Image (cartoon, rainbow, N blue to C red):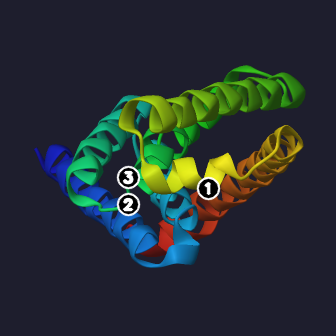
Amino acid sequence: MREKTYRTAFGGIISALALTFLFLGSVFPFADIAGPAFASLCVLLTGLEFSGRFSLGVYASVSVLAFMLVPDKESVLLFIFFFGWFPILKKAADSRMRLLPSLLVKLAAFNLSIVLMYWLILKVFVIESVADEFSDYSTAMYFLIMILANITVIILDYAFSKVAYLYLNIWRKKLIR
């Protein structure tokens, strides 16, 4: 019974923290990508503390609540389409594959999800501010943005590995007694 209570409390607190990061990402204009990235750290910590299935539950609950509560829908869609499930994919890919195949799987998943997300933003949800921003770009600019985004995902993957190491070997001992 105590384990269930701990899991429920941890899930609720970590979900609230993730929602806070997403909300702050929509409040500050420069943090529209940082908010979902920090919210994904919450999913990462949940996956490290419990199972991938439990972290999927946190991801789903944060996604639904954020879609209803957070004003910046582009930031929420970034979390839903990439940042939210990336820690779950990272844990699964890193445990089953070597470094290069794991990285290629993560990059392929990123590219597919981002293209799908922006297609939905431009064609289904029709968010005017994003459409106006993208109308100014040339084809070369789209490729440059995707190359830089892939480099950013590689850096994010490395950073998540370091955060996971720090949590498991240093922070967890101090936080959970």
Locate residue 108 relative to residue 17 in the image: left or right. Answer: right
Q: How many numbered discs?
A: 3
Q: Position of residue 80 (x, y in %)?
A: 43, 40
What residue is shown at x 32% (from left), y 44% (from top)? 63
Most foreground residue, 124 or 65: 124
Residue 83, percent across and down?
54, 46
- The three-letter code of the residue at mark 1 reads Glu
The answer to whether the residues at label 3 and label 1 have Cβ atoms under 8 Å apart is no
Q: Which residue is mark 1?
A: 133
10 Å neighbourhood of mark 1: few (<14), some, or many (≥20)?
A: few
Where, quadrant-wise, is the C terminus in this rendering? bottom left
**Dot 2: within a 10 Å radius of its alpha carbon, few (fewer than 14), some, or many (20 or more) residues?**
some
Where disc 3 sits, the SS reads helix
3D distance between C-alphas at marks 2 and 3: 4 Å
Q: Label 2: which residue?
A: 72
Left or right: residue 7 compared with residue 128:
left
Q: Which of the two discs, 3 and 1, labels the residue nearer the N terminus?
A: 3
Q: Amino acid at mark 2?
A: Asp
Q: Nearer the viewer, residue 108 or 86?
A: 108
Closer to the eye: label 2 or 1: 1
Q: Residue furthest left?
A: 1
Circle 3 is placed at which residue position? 73
Residue at the image position 65 percent from the left and 48 percent from the top: 134
- Check disc 1 and report its element: helix, strand or loop: helix
98 shown above or below 57: above
Residue occupying the point 21% across, 58% down: 69
Q: In this image, 9 relative to 46: left or right? A: left
Give the numbered dot on residue 60: none
Q: Secondary structure at mark 2?
A: loop
Image side of residue 32 versus residue 158, left or right = left
The N terminus is located in which quarter?
A: top left
